[in-house]
Amino acid sequence: MTPSAPSQPVRVAALYRFARLDAFEALRAPLAAFCCGRGIKGTMLLAHEGINGTVAGSEAAIAELIAHLEAIVGLAGLEVKYSSAEQMPFHRMKVRLKREIVTMGIDNLDPGTSAGTYVAPADWNALISEPETIVIDTRNAYEVSIGTFKGAIDPATASFREFPAWVEEHRAELEGRKVAMFCTGGIRCEKATAYVKSLGFDDVFHLKGGILKYLEEVPAEQSLWQGECFVFDERVSVSHGLAEGEAELCRACRHPLTRDELASPHYAAGISCPHCLDARSDEDRQRYAERQRQVELAEARGKGPHIGC
């Protein structure tokens, strides 16, 4: 099949499935070829515990991919969230083999059979508004910085590997409470609930489909979401209705920036932002400045970043 450019707007699919894939390595090359042959770009991760990824392409190409994945033994019943982008939000297609499809570093967890109770977006507000419910954002601190649910606890983790240690440290605070967790698309909080349940907690819940599904289904006037939701592609963030947000990335440290942070005197496109100004040396900033100059020259010549499989 001859690759074709996706029509506008681009269809974006965030997908995952916890499932035992004993021969996951053998899926890598055929899956990469399937996607590249249809102009699909993004990243998919394969591991013994299943599949995780976000990809983009034409509506027809993405539909073909989902049907193809659903036909693979063990992957039927994929959790998929769809959104759109005005331009292709990925530069290339990557299919990677991993030890875990979302890295926590805890062995012998099976989220497919031991995760917490799903809560539909329509029922989420009622749960997190109950006084006995403790609401935990399982994402990393840089994601939380541009948006989260009203009243949610931010564990301030730099990576998901730090989450089990945070739970152990705050275990006493969770005792006797309903524990409600959420994440971007549902995969991290599904694994997080399986871990918390393994510690002996029973009243453990997570938002089905994650923040993306909530923003898609819950009207803005009824929403308890505050800010924007960070996404791992060139859109940077989305808001209610999954419209593209206003956040931008600092190209020096990859931290998402709000409108106020973009107006900071510490922000220089491609060079620095309020989050990394004091963490980088003058030599680093000189290197970033040269890189930014090359990017701007390439854009002026009509040559964007490499876009290939």
Image (tube, rainbow, N blue to C red):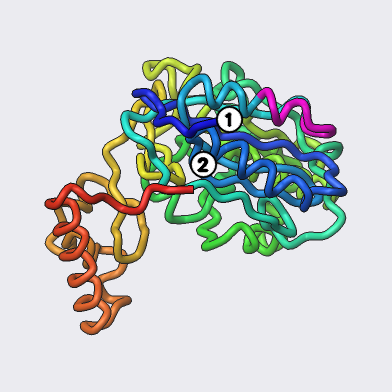
Residue 183 visible, this angle: yes
Q: What kind of residue is marked 2?
A: Ala
Residue drawn at (19%, 64%) of the image: 294
Location of residue 77 with respect to 44 vertically, above or below: above
Q: Is residue 87 above or below residue 294?
A: above
Secondary structure type for disc 1 = helix
Q: Which mark is residue 128?
A: 1
Q: What residue appears at the point 45 percent right and 40 percent down from the top-left corner?
A: 148
Whether residue 167 is visible here, answered yes or no, is no
The quarter in which the N terminus is drawn is top right
Query: Which label is found at residue 152?
Result: 2
Query: Rounded to the nearest whole Å, what is the CA distance between mark 2 and mark 1?
Result: 9 Å
The kind of residue on which mark 1 rests is Ile
Left/right of residue 81 with respect to residue 97 in the rendered view = left
Query: Magenta residues, as a range?
Result: 67-75
Mark 2 / mark 1, whichever is N-terminal: 1
Looking at the image, residue 143 lies above or below residue 275: above
Please give the name of the residue rendered at 69% of the width and 50% of the height, measured from the top-left corner.
101
- 69 in the magenta segment: yes
Asked if the residue under mark 1 is in contact with the one under mark 2, i.e. CB atoms within 8 Å, the reply is: yes
User: Toward the viewer: 241 or 307?
Assistant: 307
| Residue 97 vertical position relative to residue 116 in the rendered view, above or below | below
82 sits left or right of 104 in the view = left
Spot occupied by residue 212 in the image (x, y as percentages of width and height)? 50, 30
